[in-house]
Image: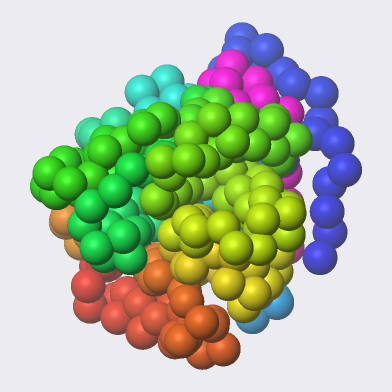
Amino acid sequence: MRKQGKLFAAVSMSAFLLVGMNSIFADGNKYAWYAPAPHPYFEEMKKGVAGFAKEYGVEVNMVVGSSWTQGPEDQDIRALAADGYNLFSIFPCDPSGANGLYEEIVARGAFVNNFGATTTWPTPAGFYSGTDIPACAGQAAEALAKLINFKGNVILAVGALGDLNAQKCSVAARAVFAKYKGIKILQEVSDMSSVEVAQEKMESAISSNIKVLDGILMTDYTPTDAAATVLAEYYEKNPKAKHIFVIGRDDTEKVLNAIRSGIIDGTSAQNAYGMGYLPMVLLKYQSEGWIRKNDAAYNVFSGHMIVTKKNINTYQAELVTLVKNIKSKMEKDYLKKK
């Protein structure tokens, strides 16, 4: 697969408007996958994009930007469109602002699908493929609530403030905890765009609440990675300490090893492969004249599940099977011919 190390020089909006549709798309369909900034989970999604490219014998330009803000994303996508890319799978930075960008390129014959996060409805995007974010966070909160027997003090840790999903996760988790009068949120930890920042913040949150802490819920990878390190060191120094129940997010090898060792009780695994793969398959359909069946078909959820010691050896196969099932029903559930 050809990978583009650097984006072509960004074109101004006036220059972009002067490029005719025929000249932009003269060489046929060109696929682009765009993530706004580096993040470990985007690396997992790339595997699904690569799987699509191999299966269908096409090239996909996988580009990772440098910022969680809409301005740089606009510039990068316009540059790609000016270079002839017309099939886009994009993680939008701003739910409203991205719609303006999409309108520009869709008006010129391109197709755009969201992955990982959605844009504000109504949207020029054809589909959103990713996790049902509120449902995923709610499921994780329920799992933690059950572990602490529906009473106790918890820390809620979300990810980067610039991530569209962080606020959704916080709202959904808080709604679950609010159902149980015995659960109290001691602290919400946020703005952790990197593992290094998360390490410092999680260590501070855990140490300052350790005497009364019963559970921790993480809704992003960075605090999960950090908490695994902090708690491993804590238990090593305090082997007789009370166990703190933990549900994390994502299924990196470090997190899975923490589950195997008992430091973390479980993690909410998103279907990263599906988030990479499914939007690309949908783009192929769209390029061949298929359209969304109805507004309800906009959400093509890729699935999620809680991983514990019980299913740690089987969950990946279950997620792959889920992707195959979704794909097999695309024409029935999500698409129709024009």
176 and 3: which one is in front? 176
At x 48% / y 68%, what residue is drawn? 265
Q: Decide: is 199 above or below 231.
A: above
Boundaries of the magenta span: 59-74
Which quadrant of the rendered structure holds the C terminus? bottom left
Q: Quadrant of the N terminus?
A: bottom right
Left/right placement of residue 72 relative to residue 298 reads right
Residue 261 x %, y %: 64, 74
Between 287 and 300, the one lying in front of the other is 300
Identify which residue is drawn at 62% across, 78% down: 260
* Quadrant of the image occupied by residue 306: bottom left
Taking the spot 56% from the left edge, 58% from the top edge, the residue there is: 241
Q: Position of residue 12 (x, y in %)?
A: 68, 12
Residue shown at the point (29%, 48%) measured from the top left: 152
Query: Which of 290/181 is in front?
Result: 181
Q: Is residue 76 above or below residue 210?
A: above
Residue 235 rendering spot, x and y as whole percentages: 66, 58
Q: Is residue 46 above or below residue 116?
A: below
